[in-house]
């Protein structure tokens, strides 16, 4: 079920929000003990909000396509009166005194909040294994990670525990779990959606955005997250695939792929070519420096945020996250500044790569969802650390601030989802969504 | 401070703080820092850093 399909039926009174919400809560009750997607379920509040939405719609006060839609929030995002744990026992007693800006906007659009989803502790990881509330499991194969850090949000969408969800993305944390669980994840351009009221990992790399069942649903949520004057009343139409100009950033971003991921992405690119897209190769000269630039920035920023609690509550962190935060405290100022310069260089190079194109196209995730506990995965060129592989294809657009979206494009021989990533021009997220709608439709028809 | 000098100091500090598990991650960070310092944008400190397009802000 998609928001785009059900919203008109809600508006006409053919479907009730209360029923939709009950269905999502039933899914949570049935599946959460196994998948651990939710840290907090707000059933009572959700049902009350759903009944209110039904009354408003019946009275002719329909607010738009999110009115009465069950939505979840990554437990990094404040929901007034409810704990924001950030997936950590460090914050087990922290109750939000107010909504985050993004929560307020979704609430004003009529969203019904069913709960707070599990994540890699403080969003500082890509597998949702290190959570103070227990690891989350991939719904396609529960022996595998759902990706992260917004792992619970991706599970919620994939299993119908909620129809929409809010995630955050510092190095890929919306797009990685979207790819691993077979759903859509949209990272808007940096700063487009307010991060106020969202626990930060790195304020200069953090992005807030939606995960969804389809590109249209991602757009509906993204549009509602924007300031009122930037919203558009009508959803964008799909771009024409024939003549769509797509750039493949060959080299580093394609060098260390799982064989199955490479096969699926190559086949998708060939399909898009045959459908009329103009696919050319482009270069990002400093692509190989992205990982080290990213590392020094995220470590420096995380060290600043966690300095006090690392001293006061060191044993409330999960061991792996605590270790990485302790390491972060050793980054030298001069190296942090070198990384800042590198970030600007890379942002400039992504702008250059996009010249004359509608979007860049590449895998969202170099590997399929990794087995829980895996330290390395086999890829072209030999085994590589899971964390490095998980971030490899997504972190460029956190450094550069360009909008990027992941959408499913096929499965491995073992049935695990593979994600295709499109990255667009700054300030043109709507155009990126139009391109993604065209690609999504074409893949569905393949 | 060279990366080698930094690593010696950091490892000693981690040991003093009772965090021996930090040694391995610090060695990995040292390799990443070597790579960062070798990047060519560090070659000329007088060179302007590219300006990000205003839409990013």
Image (cartoon, rainbow, N blue to C red):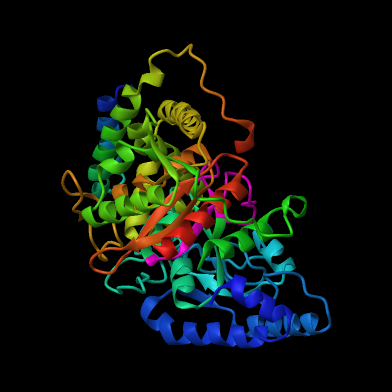
Q: Position of residue A230 (x, y in %)?
A: 73, 50
Rendered residue at 57%/44% (across/down):
A190
Relative to A366, does residue A7 appear above or below in the rendering? below
Q: Position of residue B25 (x, y in %)?
A: 27, 44
Main SS of the magenta part reads loop
Relative to A85, does residue A272 appear above or below in the rendering? above
Rendered residue at 73%/85% (across/down):
A13
Of the 4 image quadrants, the one containing the C terminus of chain A is: bottom left
Q: Position of residue A146 (x, y in %)?
A: 37, 66
Residue A400 horizontal side relative to residue A283, left or right: right
Rendered residue at 33%/52% (across/down):
A265
Relative to A346, does residue A381 appear above or below in the rendering? below
Tell whether position A305 is magenta: no
> Which image quarter: residue A253?
top left
Tell whether position A195 is magenta: yes
- The answer to whether residue A267 shows anywhere in this view is yes
Relative to A232, does residue A140 appear above or below in the rendering? below
All told, the count of numbered labels is: 0
Viewer-side residue, A150 vs A263: A263
Q: Position of residue A141 (x, y in %)?
A: 30, 73
- The answer to whether residue A174 shows anywhere in this view is no
Q: Residue furthest left?
A: A382
> Which image quarter: residue A296?
top left
Residue A339 horizontal side relative to residue A110, left or right: left
**Which stretch is magenta?**
A181-208
């Amino acid at each position: 079920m998609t928001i785009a399909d059900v919203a008109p039926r809600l508006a006409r009174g053919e479907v009730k929000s209360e029923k939709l919400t009950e269905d999502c809560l039933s899914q949570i009750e049935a599946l959460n003990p196994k998948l651990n997607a939710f840290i907090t379920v707000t059933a009572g509040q959700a049902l009350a909000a759903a009944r209110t939405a039904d009354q408003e719609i019946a009275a002719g006060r329909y607010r738009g396509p999110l009115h009465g839609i069950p939505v979840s929030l990554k437990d990094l995002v404040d929901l007034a009166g409810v704990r924001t744990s950030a997936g950590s026992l460090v914050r087990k007693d922290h109750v939000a005194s107010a909504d985050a800006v993004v929560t307020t906007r979704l609430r004003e659009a009529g969203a019904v909040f069913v709960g707070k989803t599990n994540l890699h502790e403080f969003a500082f990881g890509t597998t949702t294994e290190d959570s103070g509330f227990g690891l989350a499991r991939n719904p396609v194969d529960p022996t595998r990670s759902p990706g992260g850090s917004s792992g619970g949000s991706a599970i919620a969408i994939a299993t119908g525990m909620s129809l929409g969800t809010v995630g955050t993305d510092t190095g890929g944390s919306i797009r990685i779990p979207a790819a691993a669980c077979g759903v859509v994840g949209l990272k808007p351009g940096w700063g487009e959606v307010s991060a106020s009221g969202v626990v930060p990992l790195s304020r200069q790399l953090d992005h807030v955005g939606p995960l969804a069942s389809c590109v249209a649903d991602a757009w509906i949520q993204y549009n509602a997250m924007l300031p009122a004057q930037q919203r558009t009343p009508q959803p964008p139409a799909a771009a024409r695939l024939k003549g769509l100009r797509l750039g493949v950033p060959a080299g580093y971003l394609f060098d260390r792929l799982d064989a199955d991921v490479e096969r699926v992405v190559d086949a998708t690119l060939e399909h898009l070519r045959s459908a009329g897209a103009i696919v050319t190769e482009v270069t990002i000269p400093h692509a190989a420096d992205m990982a080290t630039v990213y590392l020094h920035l995220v470590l420096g920023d995380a060290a600043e945020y966690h300095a006090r609690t690392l001293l006061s509550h060191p044993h409330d962190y999960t061991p792996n996250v605590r270790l990485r935060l302790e390491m972060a405290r050793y980054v030298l100022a001069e190296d942090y500044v070198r990384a800042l310069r590198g970030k600007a260089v890379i942002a400039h190079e992504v702008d250059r790569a996009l010249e004359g194109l509608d979007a860049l196209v590449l895998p969202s995730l170099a590997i399929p969802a990794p087995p829980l506990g895996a330290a390395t995965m086999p890829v072209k060129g030999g085994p590589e650390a899971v964390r490095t592989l998980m971030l490899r294809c997504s972190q460029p657009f956190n450094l550069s601030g360009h909008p990027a979206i992941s959408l499913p494009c096929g499965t491995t021989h073992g049935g695990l989802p593979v994600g295709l990533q499109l990255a667009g021009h700054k300030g043109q997220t709507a155009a990126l969504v139009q391109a993604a709608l065209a690609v999504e439709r074409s893949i569905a028809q393949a | 401070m060279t990366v080698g000098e930094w690593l010696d100091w950091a490892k000693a500090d981690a040991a003093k703080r009772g965090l021996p598990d930090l040694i391995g991650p610090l060695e990995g960070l040292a390799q990443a820092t070597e790579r960062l310092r070798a990047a060519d944008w560090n070659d000329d400190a007088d060179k302007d850093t590219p300006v990000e397009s205003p839409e990013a802000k």
